[in-house]
Every structure is written in structure tokens, then in C-alpha cells.
Image: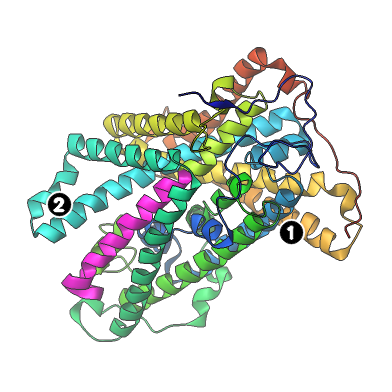
Amino acid sequence: MTQLDARPRAGDTVRGSAPADGGDGRGGVRGKGLGGNSVGLMGSAVIGVSTVYCLTSTLGSTAGEVGVQMPAVFLAGFLPMLLVAFAYRELNRAMPDCGTSFTWTVKAFGPRVGWMCGWGLVIATIIVLSNLAGVATSYFWLLAGEITGSASVAALDDSKPVHILTCLVLIAVATAISYRGMTATKGIQYALVGLQLVVLAVFVVMALSKAGSGGPDFASSLDFSWSWLNPFAVQSFAAFTAGLSLSIFMFWGWDACLTANEETTGSEKTPGRAALIAMVVLVGSYLATGIAAQMAVGSGTSGLGLANPGTSDNVFAALAGPVMGPGLGVLLFLAVLASAAASLQTTFIPVARTVLAMSAYEAMPASYAKVHPRFRTPGRATITAGIGTGAFYTVMTLVSEHVLVDTIYALGLMICFYYALTAFACAWYFRAELTRSARDLVFKGLFPLLGGTLLAAVFAKTLYDMWDPAYGSGSSVFGVGSVFVIGVGLLLLGVVLMVVMERRSPAFFRGEVLTKETPALVVEG
């Protein structure tokens, strides 16, 4: 089937707010042929929300790092993300381009920094997609075992061939849904996100009711203390940064609604507002669930304690029955599966659209700039992301489960890398406007700089800690922690690919396609 080519032609002047028709305007960017006006404010916000999957993966691990200060670390992780969200909002107003971090950092710092920022987003998303598929697969078989009442059915997840095959099927389904466009994605997201938020609310209420009940499963329950919200009470700075890295991973993904900006009604303002709404929903649900779970079972390492090494990687699997009972507990399994499926589906949005934008501006091969004529989606980029995710997960699973775990730990490095660059890009791009008003100074300068600095500090500290083989799964390569090798290796792979692309597409790297610039001072009416 014929596809549209969104790649700019030589000599094009591409300034603008990226209208869907490819017209020109402020910012030096252009439309890509995506389907405009497909998503409104609520639909865009829903795309940025998926909570339960993140909680079951990191609730116990965070408690293991910082103990009862877990809610405080959630708030600490929320702060830099909120500050960066303001940077995304301001950049999107000036340049609503689906390339987001890639496009904006090119405009601020030039093609090479922008290319690496885009690579950081792409590789982080591939790692997240593989993790999401793995969680969805595990809960699929866990739910199947609960429904059938058969432990042997649930145990099918322990079979590598069955697990990998199921994972590949789920990836294929998510790829197909994303391929069909934002309208299909939005409708399914409403159902999946609505289900998980309702079930999560029921879990919170029932966990609070079990706290202090005196039952054998809740002997370690705790009374709420405001000191849980004090980040300075964490026992060590190393523990704080480790917990903060996990917290940042939990908040990752809200920017998916920004990468859909060219398909959103009111592309200059709606995506930024949706991102802030998504952030508020996320922090509220994380705090409520974390506090309720900690009150019910405590944060210790024995019994149902959140930091129990035997259950911390999958907290809800351990708490579903005791907190909600065998009947409603199945709903929690369903909610985790729905959350992982929702995130799996929407996570294709940023990677496919970033690759589309990089190709449209000649930073990647031209074939990825193809837009499906009917669905108005980056079809080839979406399919390639699905294939890449399936291949990555299969290889990592077959090589070693420790390697797969370490790729997830390395994810925090990628997230801090491209979020921090985007935040700094905001302050630098708008530097001529910072003295225009107090609002410009705060939202275009101070907030992005502070958010970027915080994330850069976490990046540096995480990079230092990763050198130790004890970080992550405990494996090493020639005495160096495997998490460090994976994280740094993936970033260096981006450098190699950039050098290859510079030889194939010199015009982009000479700044001739997407130009570095500072916006002219404009007085808004």
C-alpha cells in the first residue's frame, strides 16, 4: 500500500507550529502528514497515565532502598519531573513537533546533541517496551491460573518458550493497535486506564481497612506518620539516589502525550496541559497506594513486608489475596495486566513518532518518514519498534535473566539523560525571552534549569554507583558492574550510529535541514 513521504525536500523552509498540513510558521519545524485533531485534552491526558504496572514493579524495590521514607522519595522523584514537564509545555507551545526532545534539542544545541537526545529517548523506550511486555505476560498467565484455579496454568509463565511466545504475541497486538492510529489507541486507553484506577482505589480503601486489624498477615502494619514524607530522613545519600532513580522510572512516560502533539486538537496548548494533568494523577495514585500498602503490611523484609526480597519484585501478586480476598484479588491481577497492556500500547507512540521526525529531518533513513495514507500513522517506524522490542526481549531473556534485569536498572540513566537535555534546551532556546516577564523567567528558565540540574545530578550519581558490580543483579564484566556496561554501552552505540548517519546524511549534521536558532522576541497579544 502506498505511504506518504513526510521527509522535507531540499530547499524547503520549515518554520512553524507543525500544522498537520505541513504549513510553515514559528520554530523551524513542519508537519509530517499525521492525522490532526484526533485527540482532545482528556484523551491526551489518558495516554500519559498508567499506574499499576509501575507500582507492582517498583513499590517493593523502593521500600527496600529507603524503608518507610518511600512516600517521600515518590515526592522527590515527582519534583524534577514536574519541573521538566513545564519545559516540555513551553517548548511545545513554540514548536509542537512530534519529535519533541529530538527536535527541541536540535533547535537549541545543534544536530549532534539533538541526535543523541533522540537516541536516548528511542533506546529507553525499547527497554521499557520489553519490560512492559514481560510484566504483561507474567500477569496474563497469573490471571489465567487464578481464573481456572490451576497452579499448572499459572506455572506456564516459568517456561521460557511459552513466556517468550506469549510476550511476542502481546507485542504484536500492541503494535497493530498503535499502527491503526490515535483514535484506536485513545478508545482502548480509556477502558484500560479507567479499569486500573478504579481497582487501585478499591485496593487503597481495603488496605487502609486492614491496617491495624491484627490479622496474621498484617502483624507488621504501621500507623501513618508525617515523617514518611520527609526525604531528609533517608538513612544515606546512596539509598536516597537509588530510590530516586526508581521513582523517576515510575513517573516516566507522561511525555507520550507530547509526542502526539501533531495529532492533538489545539496542538500548541493541549499536550502541555495534558502532561501536567497526567503528572498530578500519577503522583496522587502513587502516594495513596504507597501509604496504604505501607500502613497495611509495613516496609520490612519479612512476611508481607514491602521490602521482602521474595515478593518485592511483584508486590501486588503477594498482596492481592490478603488485602482484597480471593474474589476481588483477581481484579488486581486484571488491573496490572490492563496497566501493562495500556502502557505497552501507548509507549509505541513516542518511539515511532521520534523516529518519524528524525527521518523527516534526514537524521535517519528516509524510509521511516513514511506515513500510512489511511491511518495517518508512522507505519514503518511503529512496526520496526515492535520488531526491535520483540528481538531485544527474546535475546535478553535467552542470554540471561540477570542481563534483562540490569537493562531495566540502566533505564534510569537513559531517562535522566534525555529529560535533562530537554530541560536545558528549554532554558537555552528561550534565553532571549527570560527577561520579558516574571512568567517567562520562571517557566522558561528557572523551572527547566532546576529540573535539568536535578536529573543531571541523578544521572552522574547513578553512573558512579553503576560501576560497582553489586548494583543491579550483582553481575559484572571484567570487574565492572554490568549495569554500567549496558547503560554506557547503549549510549556509545548511539554515538557510533550517529557517525554512520553523518556520513549518509551530511546536510542534517551541517545544520542545513533543521537549524539551530534562538527565537526572536515576540510580544504576545
Position of 26 with respect to 244 (left or right) is: right
Residue 435, percent from left and from top: 91, 57
Residue 494, percent from left and from top: 57, 27
Nearest the viewer among 242 and 34 is 34
Residue 393 in which image quadrant: top left
Position of 501 with respect to 510 (left or right) is: left
For the residue carrying disc 2, how many other residues have a C-alpha within 10 Å: few (<14), some (14-19), or many (20+)?
many
Query: Which quadrant, please, contains the C terminus?
Result: bottom right
Q: Tell me the kind of residue under disc 1.
A: Phe
Report the coloring of the rendering: rainbow
Residue 326, percent from left and from top: 16, 71
Determine contact: label 1, label 2, CB under 8 Å: no
At a point 41% along the width and 46% down the height, the residue shown is 345
Q: Which residue is mark 2?
A: 154
Relative height, residue 182 to residue 483 (above, below): below
**For residue 282, which numbered disc appears in the image?**
none
Nearest the viewer among 191 and 151 is 191
Magenta part of the protein: which range?
Answer: 321-347
Residue 504, percent from left and from top: 64, 13
Q: Which residue is mark 1?
A: 447
Q: Tell me the kind of residue under disc 2.
A: Ala
Say whether residue 460 is visible. no
At a point 39% along the width and 29% down the height, the residue shown is 387
Secondary element under disc 2, as helix, strand or loop, is: helix
Say whether residue 291 is visible. yes
Secondary element under disc 1, as helix, strand or loop, is: helix
